[in-house]
Amino acid sequence: MSEITFRTATKDDLGAIVSLLSDDELAENREKPVGGDGVAEEYARAFAAMEGEHYNRMLLAEADGRIVGALQLVFVPGLSRRGATRAIVESVRVVSDLRGRNVGTAIMKEAIRRAKDAGCALVQLTSDNRRSRAHLFYRRLGFEQSHFGFKKEL
Amino acid sequence: MSEITFRTATKDDLGAIVSLLSDDELAENREKPVGGDGVAEEYARAFAAMEGEHYNRMLLAEADGRIVGALQLVFVPGLSRRGATRAIVESVRVVSDLRGRNVGTAIMKEAIRRAKDAGCALVQLTSDNRRSRAHLFYRRLGFEQSHFGFKKEL
């Protein structure tokens, strides 16, 4: 694998991103990769909504001319911790044939660097209880497993 | 206690909100309630940043003419789960003299209602590992304790 480079996604990346989101044993049944003429309409709408926010982007890792990893990076201002802005990471994915090759570490480090440069006071994320290897991965990156994550579907 | 009413915060509520954020055994050392001429400047800046987002608000519960509870409610569009918008809840607080009187339940139910009305697909939050009563509280509200929460200070 050649050197990994990073960039934020544009609308043209949407098909590749949705394929990558589906390439996951816990998430595959939650996605709908292909719609009538390519990417299903709900993803295009969501991407436009993300672009309308101050900072809510898909960060992409590329190598050898293809997208090898992605995550959503969101900066959320708030009052707690003396008016701290939090960076929230969601939907971390690495293409299945390159797992275990440090793509995840590289894109997470890039996300942390971007959050720090933007003045965020902390980075936070949640990881499904069943993803025990991911938990070790985040702890190795310096995250504290200090919280429980609760979700309620509406 | 009279009936609880709900509204989103304005800048004039900032002093009361910061006092409430500090009224918590885990968070009190993280806040700085009073600055030179009232609320410390970093809170005013953060509040303005929140108001500049599409939906990032402090939801307040009031009873008997005072603020008795607060939480931060943020709607975050994203691609996962077929382009779902997530509602993220942060910084849930109830005034110390009214804990155990269902103020927390009332304001959380209001937040869930607002998230659903706005078309969010799920509500999510993290709770410090040490807050075991809070974990029970969220499970009773129908949340699944399905994730671990990771944080890294920058």
Image (cartoon, coloured by chain):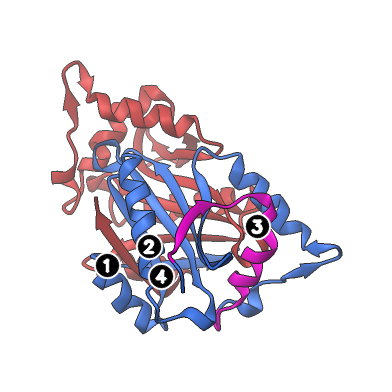
Chain colours: A blue, B red
Image mark for residue B29: none
**Whether label 1 touches label 2, CB < 8 Å:** yes
**Which chain contains the residue that carries disc 4?**
A
Q: Is residue B10 magenta?
A: no
User: Is residue A74 rendered to the left or right of residue B135?
Assistant: right
The answer to whether any part of residue B120 appears in the image is yes
Q: Amino acid at mark 3?
A: Asp
What residue is at 29 percent from the left and 78 percent from the top?
A136
Q: Tell me whether circle 2 and circle 4 mark residues in contact (CB < 8 Å).
A: yes
Q: Sequence order check: which comes first, mark 4 or mark 3?
A: 3
* Sooner in the amino-acid sequence: mark 1 or mark 4: 4
Secondary structure of residue under mark 4: helix
Q: Residue at x 35, y 47 (%)?
A: A115
Where's residue B61, x and y in %? 42, 40
The subunit letter for the residue under badge 2 reads A
> Which segment did they paint magenta?
A3-26
What residue is drawn where x is 42% and y is 38%?
B60
Give the quadrant of the C terminus of chain A: bottom right
Q: Amino acid at mark 4?
A: Gly
Residue corresponding to mark 4: A104
Q: Residue furthest left?
A: B29
How much space separates mark 3 and mark 1, taking CA atoms?
A: 27 Å
Going by the picture, which residue comes out furthest to the top? B37
Distance CA(mark 4)–CA(mark 3): 19 Å
Give me the chain letter of mark 3. A
* Amino acid found under the numbered disc labelled 1: Leu
The reply to whether label 3 and label 1 mark residues of one chain is yes
Same chain for the residues under marks 1 and 4 in the image:
yes
The CA distance from mark 1 to mark 2 is: 8 Å
Mark 3, residue position:
A13
